[in-house]
Amino acid sequence: MAADSAHHIVIVGAGFGGLEVARYLAGTNVRITVIDGRNHHLFQPLLYQVATASLATSEIAWPIRSLLRRYSNVTTLLAKVVGVNSQDQMVLLEDSTTIAFDTLVLATGARHAYFGHDEWEPFAPGLKTIEDATAIRRRILSAFERAERATDAGERSKLLTFVIIGGGPTGVELAGTIAELARETLRNDFRNFNTQDSRVVLVEAGSRLLPGFREALSDYARRTLVQLGVEVRLGQPVSQCTADGVVIDGQQLPAATILWAAGVAASPAAEWLHVPADRAGRILVAPDLTVPGHPNIFAIGDTAHVEMPDGKLVPGIAPAAKQEGRYVAETIKARLEGEKVRPPFRYSDAGSLATIGKRAAVVDFGWIKFTGRLAWWLWGFAHIYFLIGLRHRLAVALSWLWIYFTGQRSARLITQGSADSREKANQSHIPPTRP
Protein backbone atom coordinates (compact mmCIF):
# COMPACT_ATOMS: atom_id res chain seq x y z
CA MET A 1 0.00 0.00 0.00
CA ALA A 2 1.31 3.44 -0.95
CA ALA A 3 2.22 5.66 1.99
CA ASP A 4 -0.37 8.18 3.19
CA SER A 5 2.03 10.96 2.21
CA ALA A 6 1.97 9.88 -1.43
CA HIS A 7 0.28 12.07 -4.03
CA HIS A 8 -3.48 11.45 -3.72
CA ILE A 9 -5.52 11.15 -6.91
CA VAL A 10 -9.30 11.09 -6.60
CA ILE A 11 -11.29 9.79 -9.58
CA VAL A 12 -15.01 10.51 -9.58
CA GLY A 13 -16.74 8.00 -11.83
CA ALA A 14 -15.81 4.42 -12.73
CA GLY A 15 -16.85 4.50 -16.35
CA PHE A 16 -14.50 3.82 -19.26
CA GLY A 17 -12.46 6.99 -18.70
CA GLY A 18 -12.21 6.78 -14.92
CA LEU A 19 -11.16 3.12 -14.95
CA GLU A 20 -8.54 3.84 -17.59
CA VAL A 21 -6.95 6.49 -15.37
CA ALA A 22 -6.93 4.13 -12.38
CA ARG A 23 -5.42 1.23 -14.31
CA TYR A 24 -2.65 3.28 -15.90
CA LEU A 25 -1.67 4.77 -12.55
CA ALA A 26 -1.99 1.54 -10.56
CA GLY A 27 1.32 0.32 -9.22
CA THR A 28 2.90 3.79 -9.23
CA ASN A 29 3.87 5.67 -6.08
CA VAL A 30 0.51 7.40 -5.70
CA ARG A 31 -2.67 6.84 -3.74
CA ILE A 32 -5.82 6.50 -5.81
CA THR A 33 -9.40 6.73 -4.62
CA VAL A 34 -12.18 5.84 -7.06
CA ILE A 35 -15.64 7.11 -6.08
CA ASP A 36 -18.85 6.03 -7.79
CA GLY A 37 -22.51 6.15 -6.83
CA ARG A 38 -22.95 2.56 -8.04
CA ASN A 39 -20.91 -0.49 -7.23
CA HIS A 40 -20.58 -1.61 -10.85
CA HIS A 41 -18.92 -0.57 -14.08
CA LEU A 42 -21.38 -0.64 -16.96
CA PHE A 43 -20.73 -1.43 -20.63
CA GLN A 44 -23.19 1.22 -21.73
CA PRO A 45 -23.07 0.53 -25.52
CA LEU A 46 -24.97 -2.71 -24.92
CA LEU A 47 -27.43 -1.33 -22.39
CA TYR A 48 -30.21 -1.26 -24.97
CA GLN A 49 -29.85 -5.05 -25.32
CA VAL A 50 -30.77 -5.46 -21.66
CA ALA A 51 -33.74 -3.14 -22.22
CA THR A 52 -34.92 -5.29 -25.14
CA ALA A 53 -34.44 -8.68 -23.43
CA SER A 54 -31.40 -9.76 -25.47
CA LEU A 55 -28.86 -9.81 -22.63
CA ALA A 56 -28.93 -10.16 -18.86
CA THR A 57 -27.67 -7.37 -16.62
CA SER A 58 -24.80 -9.51 -15.35
CA GLU A 59 -23.42 -9.84 -18.89
CA ILE A 60 -22.66 -6.12 -19.30
CA ALA A 61 -21.75 -5.02 -15.77
CA TRP A 62 -18.92 -5.83 -13.37
CA PRO A 63 -18.30 -4.95 -9.69
CA ILE A 64 -15.85 -2.06 -9.54
CA ARG A 65 -14.07 -3.56 -6.55
CA SER A 66 -13.48 -6.77 -8.46
CA LEU A 67 -12.00 -4.88 -11.41
CA LEU A 68 -9.58 -2.94 -9.20
CA ARG A 69 -8.87 -5.40 -6.39
CA ARG A 70 -5.40 -6.41 -7.59
CA TYR A 71 -4.16 -2.81 -7.41
CA SER A 72 -2.98 -2.28 -3.83
CA ASN A 73 -2.75 1.50 -4.15
CA VAL A 74 -6.39 1.86 -5.31
CA THR A 75 -9.25 2.33 -2.85
CA THR A 76 -12.87 2.09 -4.08
CA LEU A 77 -15.67 4.01 -2.37
CA LEU A 78 -19.39 3.58 -2.97
CA ALA A 79 -20.68 7.12 -2.48
CA LYS A 80 -22.46 9.95 -4.22
CA VAL A 81 -20.44 13.10 -4.89
CA VAL A 82 -22.47 16.30 -4.52
CA GLY A 83 -19.81 18.97 -4.89
CA VAL A 84 -16.16 19.99 -5.06
CA ASN A 85 -14.37 22.56 -2.89
CA SER A 86 -11.58 23.45 -5.29
CA GLN A 87 -9.95 25.97 -2.93
CA ASP A 88 -9.48 23.44 -0.11
CA GLN A 89 -9.10 20.55 -2.57
CA MET A 90 -11.97 18.54 -1.15
CA VAL A 91 -14.59 16.32 -2.76
CA LEU A 92 -17.93 16.62 -0.96
CA LEU A 93 -20.02 13.48 -0.45
CA GLU A 94 -23.76 13.17 0.08
CA ASP A 95 -23.36 12.14 3.74
CA SER A 96 -21.47 15.43 4.41
CA THR A 97 -18.07 13.75 4.61
CA THR A 98 -15.15 14.98 2.50
CA ILE A 99 -12.26 13.41 0.62
CA ALA A 100 -9.07 15.44 0.20
CA PHE A 101 -7.22 15.31 -3.12
CA ASP A 102 -4.01 16.49 -4.71
CA THR A 103 -5.26 15.75 -8.22
CA LEU A 104 -8.91 15.31 -9.16
CA VAL A 105 -10.27 13.55 -12.26
CA LEU A 106 -13.94 14.16 -13.04
CA ALA A 107 -15.37 11.34 -15.17
CA THR A 108 -18.95 11.70 -14.04
CA GLY A 109 -20.75 10.82 -17.27
CA ALA A 110 -24.05 12.13 -18.58
CA ARG A 111 -27.75 12.10 -17.81
CA HIS A 112 -30.92 12.50 -19.88
CA ALA A 113 -31.77 15.90 -21.41
CA TYR A 114 -35.35 16.73 -22.36
CA PHE A 115 -34.66 20.15 -23.91
CA GLY A 116 -36.57 22.04 -21.26
CA HIS A 117 -39.37 19.46 -20.93
CA ASP A 118 -38.31 17.58 -17.82
CA GLU A 119 -41.99 16.82 -17.18
CA TRP A 120 -41.76 14.26 -20.02
CA GLU A 121 -39.36 12.00 -18.13
CA PRO A 122 -42.00 9.89 -16.32
CA PHE A 123 -43.59 9.07 -19.67
CA ALA A 124 -40.48 8.82 -21.86
CA PRO A 125 -37.61 7.29 -19.85
CA GLY A 126 -34.05 7.44 -21.13
CA LEU A 127 -31.41 4.73 -21.10
CA LYS A 128 -28.27 5.40 -19.06
CA THR A 129 -28.23 2.92 -16.18
CA ILE A 130 -29.00 -0.71 -15.38
CA GLU A 131 -32.06 0.52 -13.52
CA ASP A 132 -33.22 2.36 -16.66
CA ALA A 133 -32.72 -0.76 -18.77
CA THR A 134 -34.64 -3.11 -16.48
CA ALA A 135 -37.46 -0.56 -16.10
CA ILE A 136 -37.72 -0.19 -19.89
CA ARG A 137 -37.66 -3.97 -20.36
CA ARG A 138 -40.49 -4.20 -17.85
CA ARG A 139 -42.49 -1.58 -19.75
CA ILE A 140 -42.02 -3.27 -23.11
CA LEU A 141 -42.85 -6.78 -21.93
CA SER A 142 -45.70 -5.60 -19.72
CA ALA A 143 -47.28 -3.85 -22.70
CA PHE A 144 -47.60 -7.20 -24.48
CA GLU A 145 -48.94 -8.87 -21.34
CA ARG A 146 -51.60 -6.17 -20.89
CA ALA A 147 -52.51 -6.39 -24.56
CA GLU A 148 -53.23 -10.11 -24.11
CA ARG A 149 -56.03 -9.35 -21.67
CA ALA A 150 -57.32 -6.07 -23.14
CA THR A 151 -60.81 -6.28 -24.63
CA ASP A 152 -60.98 -2.86 -26.31
CA ALA A 153 -59.38 -2.66 -29.78
CA GLY A 154 -58.27 0.94 -29.32
CA GLU A 155 -56.62 0.20 -25.99
CA ARG A 156 -54.86 -2.84 -27.44
CA SER A 157 -53.58 -0.75 -30.36
CA LYS A 158 -52.19 1.78 -27.90
CA LEU A 159 -50.49 -0.95 -25.88
CA LEU A 160 -48.88 -2.35 -29.02
CA THR A 161 -47.52 1.03 -30.14
CA PHE A 162 -43.90 1.76 -29.21
CA VAL A 163 -42.47 5.23 -29.87
CA ILE A 164 -38.73 5.92 -29.78
CA ILE A 165 -37.74 9.59 -29.80
CA GLY A 166 -34.31 10.27 -31.28
CA GLY A 167 -32.65 8.89 -34.40
CA GLY A 168 -29.09 8.48 -33.15
CA PRO A 169 -27.43 5.08 -32.63
CA THR A 170 -29.41 4.29 -29.46
CA GLY A 171 -32.74 5.15 -31.09
CA VAL A 172 -31.96 3.14 -34.22
CA GLU A 173 -30.79 0.15 -32.19
CA LEU A 174 -33.84 0.24 -29.91
CA ALA A 175 -36.28 0.53 -32.81
CA GLY A 176 -34.78 -2.35 -34.76
CA THR A 177 -34.59 -4.68 -31.78
CA ILE A 178 -38.13 -3.95 -30.54
CA ALA A 179 -39.46 -4.62 -34.04
CA GLU A 180 -37.68 -7.98 -34.12
CA LEU A 181 -38.84 -8.79 -30.59
CA ALA A 182 -42.46 -8.23 -31.62
CA ARG A 183 -42.40 -9.83 -35.05
CA GLU A 184 -40.09 -12.76 -34.40
CA THR A 185 -39.33 -13.57 -30.77
CA LEU A 186 -42.88 -13.21 -29.40
CA ARG A 187 -44.92 -14.19 -32.44
CA ASN A 188 -46.10 -17.55 -31.05
CA ASP A 189 -46.41 -16.55 -27.40
CA PHE A 190 -49.85 -14.88 -27.31
CA ARG A 191 -53.34 -16.12 -28.16
CA ASN A 192 -55.60 -13.06 -28.17
CA PHE A 193 -53.68 -10.89 -30.64
CA ASN A 194 -51.04 -11.07 -33.33
CA THR A 195 -47.72 -9.54 -32.30
CA GLN A 196 -47.16 -8.70 -35.98
CA ASP A 197 -49.72 -5.94 -35.43
CA SER A 198 -47.26 -4.13 -33.15
CA ARG A 199 -46.31 -0.65 -34.29
CA VAL A 200 -42.78 0.68 -33.76
CA VAL A 201 -42.37 4.38 -34.55
CA LEU A 202 -38.95 6.08 -34.63
CA VAL A 203 -39.17 9.87 -34.51
CA GLU A 204 -36.28 12.17 -35.42
CA ALA A 205 -36.61 15.95 -35.52
CA GLY A 206 -33.69 16.22 -37.95
CA SER A 207 -33.62 15.42 -41.63
CA ARG A 208 -31.96 12.00 -41.31
CA LEU A 209 -31.08 9.18 -38.95
CA LEU A 210 -27.57 8.69 -37.53
CA PRO A 211 -26.47 12.30 -38.15
CA GLY A 212 -22.90 11.45 -37.11
CA PHE A 213 -22.56 9.00 -40.01
CA ARG A 214 -22.26 9.62 -43.73
CA GLU A 215 -25.51 10.32 -45.51
CA ALA A 216 -25.41 7.06 -47.51
CA LEU A 217 -25.18 5.06 -44.26
CA SER A 218 -28.03 7.06 -42.73
CA ASP A 219 -30.19 6.26 -45.74
CA TYR A 220 -29.30 2.57 -45.48
CA ALA A 221 -30.29 2.56 -41.80
CA ARG A 222 -33.66 4.13 -42.65
CA ARG A 223 -34.38 1.63 -45.43
CA THR A 224 -33.37 -1.33 -43.27
CA LEU A 225 -35.59 -0.21 -40.39
CA VAL A 226 -38.53 0.17 -42.76
CA GLN A 227 -37.94 -3.39 -43.97
CA LEU A 228 -38.10 -4.52 -40.34
CA GLY A 229 -41.50 -2.84 -40.04
CA VAL A 230 -40.42 0.34 -38.26
CA GLU A 231 -42.18 3.59 -39.13
CA VAL A 232 -39.49 6.24 -39.52
CA ARG A 233 -40.62 9.85 -39.18
CA LEU A 234 -37.99 12.44 -40.09
CA GLY A 235 -38.22 16.19 -39.62
CA GLN A 236 -41.15 15.75 -37.26
CA PRO A 237 -40.41 16.96 -33.72
CA VAL A 238 -42.32 15.73 -30.69
CA SER A 239 -44.17 18.51 -28.92
CA GLN A 240 -45.85 16.58 -26.11
CA CYS A 241 -45.44 13.35 -24.10
CA THR A 242 -48.17 12.12 -21.76
CA ALA A 243 -49.55 8.88 -20.38
CA ASP A 244 -51.81 8.75 -23.44
CA GLY A 245 -49.01 9.00 -26.03
CA VAL A 246 -47.17 11.67 -27.98
CA VAL A 247 -47.93 14.60 -30.23
CA ILE A 248 -45.78 14.43 -33.39
CA ASP A 249 -45.82 17.34 -35.79
CA GLY A 250 -49.13 18.45 -34.30
CA GLN A 251 -50.81 15.02 -34.49
CA GLN A 252 -51.71 12.84 -31.51
CA LEU A 253 -50.35 9.27 -31.54
CA PRO A 254 -51.69 7.02 -28.75
CA ALA A 255 -48.83 4.91 -27.35
CA ALA A 256 -48.33 3.04 -24.11
CA THR A 257 -44.53 2.86 -24.38
CA ILE A 258 -42.41 5.92 -25.18
CA LEU A 259 -38.61 5.77 -25.00
CA TRP A 260 -36.27 8.75 -25.01
CA ALA A 261 -33.06 8.61 -27.06
CA ALA A 262 -32.93 12.22 -28.23
CA GLY A 263 -30.43 13.98 -26.02
CA VAL A 264 -28.13 13.92 -23.03
CA ALA A 265 -26.70 16.46 -20.63
CA ALA A 266 -23.49 16.28 -18.66
CA SER A 267 -23.40 15.73 -14.92
CA PRO A 268 -23.42 18.89 -12.74
CA ALA A 269 -19.60 18.91 -12.49
CA ALA A 270 -19.39 22.36 -14.11
CA GLU A 271 -21.81 23.69 -11.48
CA TRP A 272 -19.69 22.21 -8.69
CA LEU A 273 -16.66 24.16 -9.92
CA HIS A 274 -18.50 27.26 -11.21
CA VAL A 275 -16.69 27.07 -14.54
CA PRO A 276 -17.88 27.69 -18.14
CA ALA A 277 -19.74 24.87 -19.87
CA ASP A 278 -21.40 24.29 -23.23
CA ARG A 279 -25.16 24.00 -23.77
CA ALA A 280 -25.10 20.33 -22.72
CA GLY A 281 -23.33 21.18 -19.45
CA ARG A 282 -19.91 19.83 -20.48
CA ILE A 283 -16.92 21.64 -19.00
CA LEU A 284 -14.94 23.65 -21.56
CA VAL A 285 -11.59 22.06 -20.81
CA ALA A 286 -8.12 23.22 -21.84
CA PRO A 287 -6.15 21.34 -24.54
CA ASP A 288 -4.56 19.19 -21.81
CA LEU A 289 -8.04 18.29 -20.46
CA THR A 290 -7.62 20.36 -17.31
CA VAL A 291 -10.37 22.62 -16.05
CA PRO A 292 -9.40 26.26 -16.80
CA GLY A 293 -8.13 27.91 -13.65
CA HIS A 294 -7.70 24.55 -11.93
CA PRO A 295 -4.52 22.87 -13.21
CA ASN A 296 -4.89 19.97 -10.78
CA ILE A 297 -8.44 19.09 -11.91
CA PHE A 298 -9.12 17.12 -15.10
CA ALA A 299 -12.43 16.43 -16.83
CA ILE A 300 -12.90 13.60 -19.32
CA GLY A 301 -15.58 11.65 -21.17
CA ASP A 302 -19.12 13.02 -21.22
CA THR A 303 -18.11 15.53 -18.55
CA ALA A 304 -15.80 17.43 -20.93
CA HIS A 305 -16.23 19.53 -24.05
CA VAL A 306 -13.18 18.52 -26.12
CA GLU A 307 -12.67 19.83 -29.63
CA MET A 308 -10.69 18.23 -32.43
CA PRO A 309 -8.43 20.33 -34.70
CA ASP A 310 -11.28 20.70 -37.24
CA GLY A 311 -13.53 22.18 -34.58
CA LYS A 312 -15.75 19.14 -34.21
CA LEU A 313 -16.40 17.69 -30.78
CA VAL A 314 -14.77 14.49 -29.67
CA PRO A 315 -17.72 12.05 -29.60
CA GLY A 316 -19.12 10.80 -26.32
CA ILE A 317 -18.24 7.15 -26.93
CA ALA A 318 -16.23 4.55 -25.02
CA PRO A 319 -13.04 4.65 -27.16
CA ALA A 320 -12.84 8.43 -26.78
CA ALA A 321 -13.24 8.25 -23.00
CA LYS A 322 -10.55 5.56 -22.79
CA GLN A 323 -8.14 7.66 -24.86
CA GLU A 324 -8.78 10.68 -22.65
CA GLY A 325 -8.29 8.60 -19.51
CA ARG A 326 -4.98 7.25 -20.80
CA TYR A 327 -3.80 10.76 -21.73
CA VAL A 328 -4.69 12.11 -18.26
CA ALA A 329 -2.86 9.25 -16.54
CA GLU A 330 0.23 9.87 -18.66
CA THR A 331 0.03 13.59 -17.92
CA ILE A 332 -0.17 12.97 -14.18
CA LYS A 333 2.81 10.60 -14.37
CA ALA A 334 4.81 13.17 -16.33
CA ARG A 335 4.03 15.90 -13.80
CA LEU A 336 5.11 13.73 -10.89
CA GLU A 337 8.37 13.10 -12.74
CA GLY A 338 8.95 16.83 -13.17
CA GLU A 339 7.67 17.30 -16.72
CA LYS A 340 5.38 20.33 -16.63
CA VAL A 341 4.33 20.66 -20.29
CA ARG A 342 2.94 17.92 -22.51
CA PRO A 343 1.46 17.99 -26.01
CA PRO A 344 -2.28 18.62 -26.09
CA PHE A 345 -4.73 15.74 -26.27
CA ARG A 346 -5.38 14.39 -29.77
CA TYR A 347 -8.28 12.05 -30.42
CA SER A 348 -7.67 9.12 -32.75
CA ASP A 349 -10.97 8.32 -34.47
CA ALA A 350 -11.35 4.55 -34.73
CA GLY A 351 -14.62 4.83 -36.64
CA SER A 352 -18.33 4.61 -35.88
CA LEU A 353 -20.59 1.57 -35.75
CA ALA A 354 -24.32 1.07 -35.23
CA THR A 355 -26.44 -2.06 -35.46
CA ILE A 356 -29.90 -2.34 -36.98
CA GLY A 357 -31.54 -5.47 -35.64
CA LYS A 358 -29.72 -8.77 -35.54
CA ARG A 359 -28.52 -9.05 -39.12
CA ALA A 360 -27.53 -5.57 -40.28
CA ALA A 361 -25.28 -2.73 -39.19
CA VAL A 362 -23.45 0.30 -40.54
CA VAL A 363 -19.71 0.79 -40.18
CA ASP A 364 -17.83 3.99 -40.99
CA PHE A 365 -14.04 3.91 -40.63
CA GLY A 366 -13.56 7.10 -42.60
CA TRP A 367 -11.44 5.52 -45.32
CA ILE A 368 -13.97 2.73 -45.82
CA LYS A 369 -17.64 2.21 -45.09
CA PHE A 370 -19.89 -0.81 -45.47
CA THR A 371 -23.24 -2.19 -44.41
CA GLY A 372 -25.20 -5.40 -44.03
CA ARG A 373 -24.36 -8.71 -42.37
CA LEU A 374 -20.59 -8.27 -42.63
CA ALA A 375 -20.93 -4.96 -40.84
CA TRP A 376 -23.08 -6.65 -38.19
CA TRP A 377 -20.43 -9.32 -37.53
CA LEU A 378 -17.74 -6.64 -37.29
CA TRP A 379 -19.93 -4.62 -34.91
CA GLY A 380 -20.34 -7.74 -32.78
CA PHE A 381 -16.61 -8.56 -32.69
CA ALA A 382 -15.76 -4.95 -31.79
CA HIS A 383 -18.17 -4.91 -28.86
CA ILE A 384 -17.10 -8.32 -27.59
CA TYR A 385 -13.49 -7.12 -27.69
CA PHE A 386 -14.27 -4.24 -25.32
CA LEU A 387 -16.08 -6.47 -22.83
CA ILE A 388 -14.17 -7.33 -19.66
CA GLY A 389 -13.31 -10.96 -18.97
CA LEU A 390 -13.46 -14.17 -20.94
CA ARG A 391 -16.67 -15.34 -19.26
CA HIS A 392 -18.57 -12.22 -20.29
CA ARG A 393 -17.23 -12.38 -23.84
CA LEU A 394 -18.31 -15.99 -24.19
CA ALA A 395 -21.71 -15.38 -22.60
CA VAL A 396 -22.53 -12.45 -24.87
CA ALA A 397 -21.21 -14.20 -27.97
CA LEU A 398 -23.33 -17.30 -27.24
CA SER A 399 -26.42 -15.17 -26.54
CA TRP A 400 -26.00 -13.33 -29.84
CA LEU A 401 -25.45 -16.52 -31.80
CA TRP A 402 -28.57 -18.04 -30.23
CA ILE A 403 -30.62 -14.96 -31.14
CA TYR A 404 -29.09 -14.82 -34.62
CA PHE A 405 -30.06 -18.38 -35.53
CA THR A 406 -33.27 -18.87 -33.51
CA GLY A 407 -34.67 -15.38 -32.99
CA GLN A 408 -35.29 -16.18 -29.32
CA ARG A 409 -34.22 -13.88 -26.50
CA SER A 410 -33.74 -15.56 -23.14
CA ALA A 411 -33.79 -12.48 -20.87
CA ARG A 412 -37.56 -11.88 -21.15
CA LEU A 413 -38.12 -11.48 -17.42
CA ILE A 414 -40.40 -8.85 -15.90
CA THR A 415 -38.49 -8.08 -12.71
CA GLN A 416 -37.25 -5.24 -10.50
CA GLY A 417 -40.23 -4.69 -8.26
CA SER A 418 -43.66 -3.23 -8.78
CA ALA A 419 -44.79 -1.19 -11.78
CA ASP A 420 -43.60 2.40 -11.89
CA SER A 421 -45.88 5.43 -12.09
CA ARG A 422 -46.17 5.32 -15.89
CA GLU A 423 -47.13 1.63 -15.90
CA LYS A 424 -49.70 2.22 -13.15
CA ALA A 425 -51.14 5.08 -15.19
CA ASN A 426 -51.40 2.84 -18.22
CA GLN A 427 -52.95 0.02 -16.26
CA SER A 428 -55.66 2.34 -14.99
CA HIS A 429 -56.82 2.76 -18.61
CA ILE A 430 -57.13 -0.98 -19.33
CA PRO A 431 -60.70 -2.32 -19.62
CA PRO A 432 -61.72 -5.28 -17.46
CA THR A 433 -60.17 -8.68 -18.18
CA ARG A 434 -62.19 -11.18 -20.15
CA PRO A 435 -64.05 -13.64 -17.94
Image (cartoon, rainbow, N blue to C red):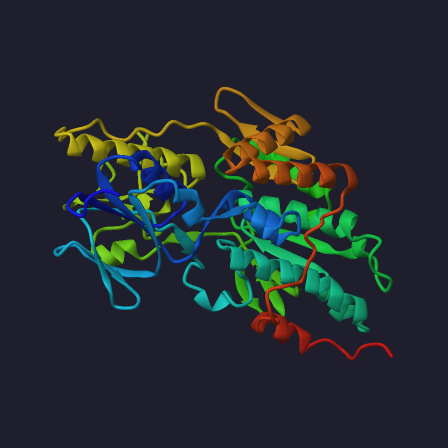
Residue 132 image offset from top left, x and y in percent: 53, 58
Closest to the observer, 222 or 332: 332
Residue 244 image offset from top left, x and y in percent: 63, 70
Residue at horizontal 30 percent and vertical 66 percent from the top: 94
Q: Is residue 243 something one can see in this rendering?
A: no
Side of 253 where 207 appears, left or right = left
Residue 31 image offset from top left, x and y in percent: 24, 44
Residue at horizontal 63 percent and vertical 63 percent from the top: 415
Closest to the observer, 3 or 153: 3
Extreme-front residue of the structure: 1
Question: Quick check: 247 above or below 178?
Answer: below
Question: Quick check: 250 above or below 243?
Answer: above
Dividing the image into 4 quarters, which one contains the N terminus?
top left
Residue 135 image offset from top left, x and y in percent: 58, 62
Residue at horizontal 76 percent and vertical 46 percent from the top: 408
Question: Quick check: 211 above or below 423?
Answer: above
Side of 320 where 366 appears, left or right = right
In which quarter of the view is residue 383 placed?
top right
Q: Is residue 98 something one can see in this rendering?
A: yes
